Amino acid sequence: MFIVIKRKTLIIAFCLVLVILAATGTGIALSQKQTFAVQSKKTVVIDAGHGGADRGVIGKNGLVESTLNLTVSKLLETKLLASDFSVVMTRTTEDGLYGDSLENFKSRDFAERKRIITELGPDMVVSIHANKFPQNASRRGIQVFYNKSSQEGKALALSLQNSLNTLNEKYVGKTFSPLAGEYFMLNCTKKPSVIVECGFLSNVEDEKLLSDPAYREELTDYILLGITNYIK
Ligand SMILES: [Zn+2]
């Protein structure tokens, strides 16, 4: 009888130890997961192209690229922050990044964008622009560019282009492949960098779409989707 009781006690004690170990184990797993979530927060630089004296492309009906880029960038910033990204904007106002003097303002504006990116060391750079192709006013659609020497840049561009092709299909009736391009903003960091040309301001239908707040919501939803699909 004594031995039986002792066995029972041992079994109960063993079970208690197991329960405590399991609980502790779960606690460790949870805290590791929480720590991982914090560490995995990705930093995105959103670069609204042009600004100040450099207004970029002007649409036939007056849509100004620098203003459009800023509007789209701010919408994207809000959505990325809501999706647990860290975001740094190269500009948040209509001003350029070259200071007061207009002397060599374009190169100083570019240098400042590069300085922000270099000092921050983000996980990716997404530069927002609008296109023009006056030689053929029928050309339209959203086009993503990457640096051909960056495989990760190409992968990010592909993810964005695939996502944005939903809109190209819906509004333009065709899809596009991402393109390699030689642009300053694709060369500021080794981290994946892309330029999203949100449409052609030389095309009146694209200009009309890009003037529509509902379309800009859709556009930034699909840019966000392209980014989140890339980091999965
Ligand atoms: Zn531009």
Image: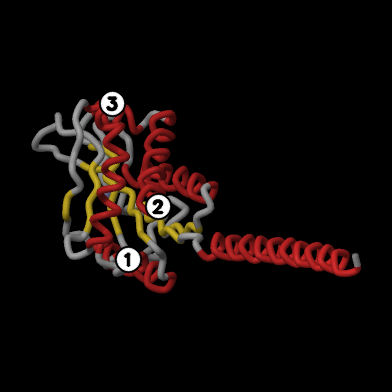
**Which is more N-terminal, label 2 or label 3?**
3
- The image quarter containing residue 200 is top left
- The image quarter containing residue 213 is top left
Residue in the image at 31% along x and 34% along y? 62
Label 2 near label 3: C-beta < 8 Å? no
Q: What is the crowding at mark 1: few (fewer than 14 residues within 10 Å), some, or many (at least 20)?
A: some
Q: Secondary structure at mark 2?
A: loop
For the N terminus, which image quadrant? bottom right
> Which x, y percent locates residue 101?
36, 66
Residue in the image at 9% along x and 37% along y? 135
- The image quarter containing residue 97 is bottom left
- Label 1, label 3: how far apart the Cα atoms are: 31 Å
- Label 1, label 2: how far apart the Cα atoms are: 16 Å
Nearer to the camera, 147 or 197: 147
> Which x, y percent locates residue 79?
49, 44
Name the residue that disc number 2 marks. Answer: 232
> Which x, y percent locates residue 116?
41, 68
Name the residue that disc number 1 marks. Answer: 191
**Which is more N-terminal, label 3 or label 1?**
3
Residue type, label 2: Lys
Name the residue that disc number 3 marks. Answer: 170
Residue type, label 3: Lys
In the image, residue 65 above or below residue 102: above
Residue type, label 1: Lys
Nearer to the camera, 207 or 16: 16
Q: Secondary structure at mark 1?
A: loop
Q: Nearer the viewer, mark 1 or mark 2?
A: 2
Q: In the figure, is residue 24 to the left or right of 156?
A: right
Outermost residue on the bottom side: it is: 119
Q: Which mark is residue 37?
A: none
Label 3 near label 1: C-beta < 8 Å? no
Residue in the image at 32% along x and 35% along y? 63
